[in-house]
Structure formats: C-alpha cells, structure tokens
Amino acid sequence: MKIDVHNHIGVDPAYEEHRAAKELVDEMEKAGIDKCVVFPFTTNPDFKEQNKVVKEAMDKYPDKLIGFFTMNPRLPEMTDLMYMYKEQGFRGVVTDPRFGVGHEAKRFHELVECALVLEMPVWLHSDDKDTMRVYIGPLEAVMSKYPGVQFILSSMYYDHVGIAARHKNVYLDTATHMSGGMTASAVQPVGTHRILMGSNSPYGLLRREVEKIEAEDVFTGFQKSLMYSLNAERLLKL
Amino acid sequence: MHVHLTEERPDAEWVWSNWPGEGRRGLSAEVFIEKMDACKPRIDKAVVFGLFSLASETPEAMRRDNDYIMRMVEKYPDRFIGAGVVDPSWGEAAIKELHRFVDAGLRVVKMRFSSMHYHANNKAAQRVFKEIGELGVLPVCHSDWTHYSNPLILGDLASMFPDVRMVMQHFGEYLSYDAISVCRKLPNVYVDTSALVLPKNIVRFIDEVSPDRIMYASDTLSVRGGLQPQDALNRVTCLELPKKQEEKVLGGNAVALLRSVGVKL
C-alpha cells in the first residue's frame, strides 16, 4: 500500500495550473500509488468553490482520493463550515497565512480547537516561516496548547525537523525534500513514525516521491512501509 | 509614499475575531492626518491604500477597502493621493476592480505578493501588470526577504514590462543590497525607504543607482508601534544628505513620479 498525502486539484490562479482529479488518478496508476490526500491549491482564495471540486473528486474516486478542505479563518461562519465539511466526508483541514490570519490569532486557535473536536488533522505549509508575520514561536505555542491535534507540516524545511522533534503531535511530509537522504536525516530526531510520503503534485511528481524513499538504503523495509502508508493510515484512521 | 488606512468599524464587527484585551487594528484617515501635521518636517501629502484586502477573502473586500480610500481622497484632496489594492488571485474580478478604481480617478496600484503567498512574477501578476501598462498607472509592490517578494523576483516582473515604472516598496527590507543590484540594471524600478533596515544604503542607492528613484515612505498602519512616520523621516534625515538630495528623497522624486502617471499635484 502506498499513500501520498500532498496533492492539489482544481485551479491555481497564480501559476495558471488547472488539474482535474482524473489527471491525478492517471498519475497514481502509473506511479503505483493506491490512495492520495487531495486539497485545493492554497493560492486560490475562492476556497469554497475549490472545496466543491475536491468533494466531487472524493465522490467520484472514493477508493482512491481522501479529501482535505481549505479554510479561511477570517470567516465568521468558519466552524459551521468545518462541521459541514466533516459531514461531507472530508478528513482534514488545510489553512494558510495567505488568508491574513497569523498563528497567534484568535481565529487560528479557534480553527485548531474545532479541528480537535472534529478529530481532524491540521495541514500547514512549513515554509510559512519564510513569509511575513508568521513566526515559529506562535506556531509552536499552538502545538503545545493543543496536544490532541495532529499537525502536518508540509515541505520539510530544516527548522521543521526541530519543531517536530519538540512536538510529538507533528507529522512531516517529504515534499520538496531534495533527496531520500535528506528525509533520512529527519529520522533520528523525529522518528520515521511521523514522516509521511507527500509529493506536492502537480508541482512535484508522485513517482519521484516513491523513488526518493525506495532508493535510500538506510531505510529498513519497516521504515519504508511507515512512510508509504502505515503512518497515514494511523493518522487518518483509514 | 506608503500608508495603510482602515475604516473605523463598530465593535461588533471585529471583537469576535480578537482576543480579549486585544485592540482593534488599523489607522483612520483623521488619525494619520494628525500624525502628518505633527511630524518634523511636516508631511504635506501621503499615498494611501487599504490594509485588510491585500490578500482578500472576496472581491467585495477589495472593493470595500478601495471605496474607503476613494472617499478619504475625496474628503481630504490636499492631503491624500489614493492607491487601489489589487489581489491578482481573483483573475477577472481583480482586473475589473483595477479598471473600476482607475476609472474613478486613482492612478496608483498596490500589490503585496507575500500576503497572497505566491511569487511576484507569476502569471496572474503578469496579467495585472499588462493592464497596468495599458492604463498608464503606477504599481507599488511590497518587497521583503521572502521567496514571494524578494527584489530579484520583483525585478524579474519589472523586467517583463520595461515601460511600466514600478516602486519596490521597503527597498527589499533586509535585502537592500539585492534591491540596489536590481535597480542598477532596471531603470524602471524605484524604491521607497519604508522598513529599510540599513539606512546607509539610501546613500549607496543615490551614489550607485540614481538620486531620482528613491522616495521617503513610512508604511504606517497603526496608531502606535510598528512603523511610524516620524521614525521613518529620521531614517532619512539622520544621513545628513546634501540639501538637494534630501529634498528629492523627501518629496521631489515622488512628485515627479506621481505626475508622470497623471496624479494632479
């Protein structure tokens, strides 16, 4: 079993990327991936429409696609929407500082609190630290405040290995890691049990993510199976 | 050249999103005029634009911010030069909003790619810049150290539109050496001094790039704290530039640039 936890479908208005669910499913078959977590492009502010695209994809490919929804914490109706999306079958929430809400903000804390109640992981860009007004301190404070919430930090930048080492409720995905060797460097401080295979497709390639793990000879077969699927299955209660 | 104004709103519209004890954010036109008058030297005019719609949750949010700016320009025509905010993520709706506020008289366009979390040279931004070029208005773009808005990425965008003059706001912040490098090669790029970390690079810019393409700015967006106009003035005046150079930085260059895009001064 192989599960890729980081894939976008829909429309990316910034880079003019349009990706249908069918394109992802075709790529999955070629790469030997059984299931993918999908969510909208975080550059698209029209997230309600994009969540609909994901919902349609989940309905069309229920055995292959696991949907996360995107949420703008600035909306007063945020928690109502989160309950609705949970009801619709979404399994996680994605948010992004592009919505103008920092990790210290009341609205971000409320999103995390709602995710706790709904038993959903919270997916965050780990490269948010490179953006304005998003600091690691407030992010770590939230991780400590809500130990019952599982966070997925995407794009395994170096600082986030340290963050994951300090916070046991943090998972890392392998997207944008240059090599399997760099993924291996996170194993000692974090543990393989919190590393998820994620390609960031369509910007990354599903096949490449498998090869990164497969080609790295320091991983045991068990460690590979954790990253390929066992961690995702445990996290998402599949 | 760089002030964010925000409309006063009833408590009920914002307290739900703030922690107890956390004050409202923002700066009204009236409060900023008081600050302009209190500055030494006094600030005569300011380029103003919105704050909350830099990355907007809806196209309506953009319009709401821009409407407030237009009302304040109408109310205080001797003090404010208005700029409209555009979030290119909204595609056609962003282009429509650009045309709407330009038709209404605004000649400056504010964009902040670090808020939108994508690279300044992306396709959507190129599309907006193409329209800006055809409208003959002035884009003013936030710069910083991130991969979204660093001077090289903004410079790449500017290089695609050599006939469009662009202001690289904040002078690259921590990356002011990079901003100088970009501006040396691209004559259509100007800088403002707001949030510049190394003030001596104002002198370096004048010496190595041009005395005509650098402008005083404060990036004030709050009543207290953060960046304030007097502190930003001090950043320039502490350099004790030759009088003619200082006059250019504190206003002469801005007047020439704004007039070149049709702002009546």
Image (spheres, coloured by chain):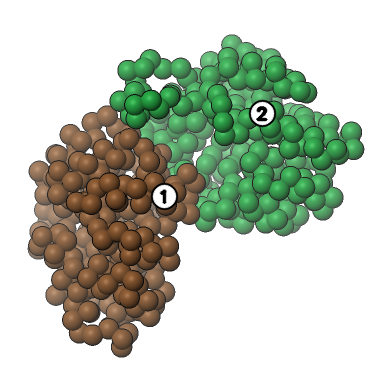
Q: Residue at x 35, y 29 (%)?
A: B18
| Picture coordinates of residue A119, whole percent (x, y) | 14, 49
The verdict on a common chain for dots 1 and 2 is no
Q: Is residue B62 above or below residue A82?
A: above
Q: Is residue B39 left or right of residue B134?
A: right
Tell me the amino acid under the disc marked 2.
Pro
Residue topped by disc 1: A137
Tell me the subunit letter for badge 1: A
In the figure, what tint was chain B given? green
Gap in angstroms between the C-alphas marked 1 and 2: 29 Å
Tell me the amino acid under the disc marked 1.
Gly
The residue mark sitting in front, 1 or 2, is 1
List the single residue furthest toward the top: B75
Q: Is residue A22 left or right of residue A189?
A: left
Q: Which mark is residue B229?
A: 2
Q: Residue at x 68, y 51 (%)?
A: B176
The answer to which of B159 and A136 lies nearer the viewer is: A136
| Picture coordinates of residue A211, whole percent (x, y) | 30, 81
Q: Residue at x 38, y 41 (%)?
A: A104
Tell me the subunit letter for badge 2: B
In this figure, what is the number of numbered marks? 2
Q: Is residue A67 left or right of residue B262?
A: left
Circle 1 SS class: helix
In the figure, what tint was chain A given? brown
Residue A92 seen in the current view: no
Q: Is residue A185 left or right of residue A33?
A: right
